[in-house]
Amino acid sequence: MIGQRLYRARKAAGLSLRELGSRIGLTHAAIKKYEDEQVTPTSATLLKLSRALNVRTEYFFRPETVALDRIEYRKRSTLPKKRLEAIEHEVIDQIERRIELENLFPEPPVAPFVPVMGFPTSVTDFSQIEDIAEAVRKSWDLGYDPIPDLVDVLETHGIRVFMIDANADPKFDGLAASVNQMPIIVVGSNWPGDRQRFTLAHELGHLMLAKRLESELDEEMACNRFAGAFLFPRQSVTQELGAHRNYIEPKELALLKEEFGLSMSAILYRARDLGIVTPAWMSNQVKLFRIKGWHITEPGNPYPAEKAHVFEQRVFHALAENYIGESKAAELMKMSLTAFQTVRTLEGSDVAAYQ
């Protein structure tokens, strides 16, 4: 058990056998023997390993419970294999802690994911995706208003959301997978909110459109269309922009971005897809955005990032009901007991990063 968990922690840290060995004063061969269960590390060595890998020693004794199924990266092919492995192992660690916590509750704290019914079995045209996005919003009682907390909406409907630090991975653009038949979505914790929200909605599109798209439809384009329609439904787009426009002011786009949490570029695509502006005008705006550098960084303040606070909240829920003690709570949040106690008394800073 220790060997497999050591392997996972090393992969999550993105370290080779030799790099980890050098950090704790051992050879790569010694680390390999630990991972292969040929030798059991001493308590002193486990402590060194935990510090080098930024995990608590309890991590090495946690039972193996999950594996990622049907992993889909939006830009998988451009990510190095080493970083792909690190991302997957980091996500598995978060999932394991989430499942361990949820299993401590007498009643499941999360409703299971239930597919929305009534969709067409075959989607042959992108325009049908508008109806599907609206059907999801109707089923989830979202109406046509902006969605202020998309993570909470997804979690409420049985889709677990996890965030990782993706600062070093400009090519990482989110992933979707399943664990024990539970759908999960992973996004970067440090991304602007509009990018997080579009990725979350895009991955939701993969769930909702699975096995429905005809072969002539590109799945990524279809999920992009779903994401835009889910975040900014056509009734709201028409209400805000009108049925036809010859020109849209950039400030209009910026204000709508603030309201709906969708990038200015994505709003332009919504206007084009719904026939509000012509494809030719839209193409000119895309060129203008590139000239101004807005395709990389849009003007104005970034849209606030989403907060994945569900795990943290449930830790304190379990603590309040005496399902766990402080030591276990600190372990689940990957914090020292002292740091956790500081946070518990509201004397510390935000600990969302420890999820």
Image: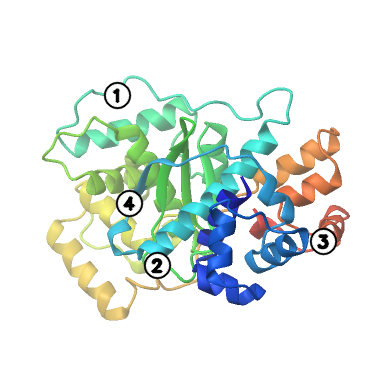
Which residue was labeled with disc 3? 339
C-alpha gap between disc 1 and disc 2: 36 Å
C-alpha gap between disc 1 and disc 4: 28 Å
Q: Are marks 1 and 4 in contact (CB under 8 Å)?
A: no
**Closer to the camera in the image, 169 or 235:** 169
* Foreground tag (1 vs 2): 1
**Closer to the camera in the image, 259 or 78:** 78
> Which three-letter amino acid code belongs to the residue tagged 1?
Phe
Residue 35 visible, this orientation: yes
Q: Are marks 1 and 3 in contact (CB under 8 Å)?
A: no
Image point 88% across, 55% down: which residue?
Answer: 345
Residue 137 position within the rendered picture, expressed as x and y whole percent measured from the top left: 43, 32
**Closer to the camera in the image, 256 or 185:** 185
> Which three-letter amino acid code belongs to the residue tagged 4?
Leu
Residue 61 position within the rendered picture, expressed as x and y whole percent measured from the top left: 69, 46
Q: Where the N terminus falls, by quadrant? A: top right
* Foreground tag (1 vs 4): 1
Q: Secondary structure at mark 4?
A: helix
> Quick check: 320 above or below 277?
above
Image point 29% across, 62% down: which residue?
Answer: 248
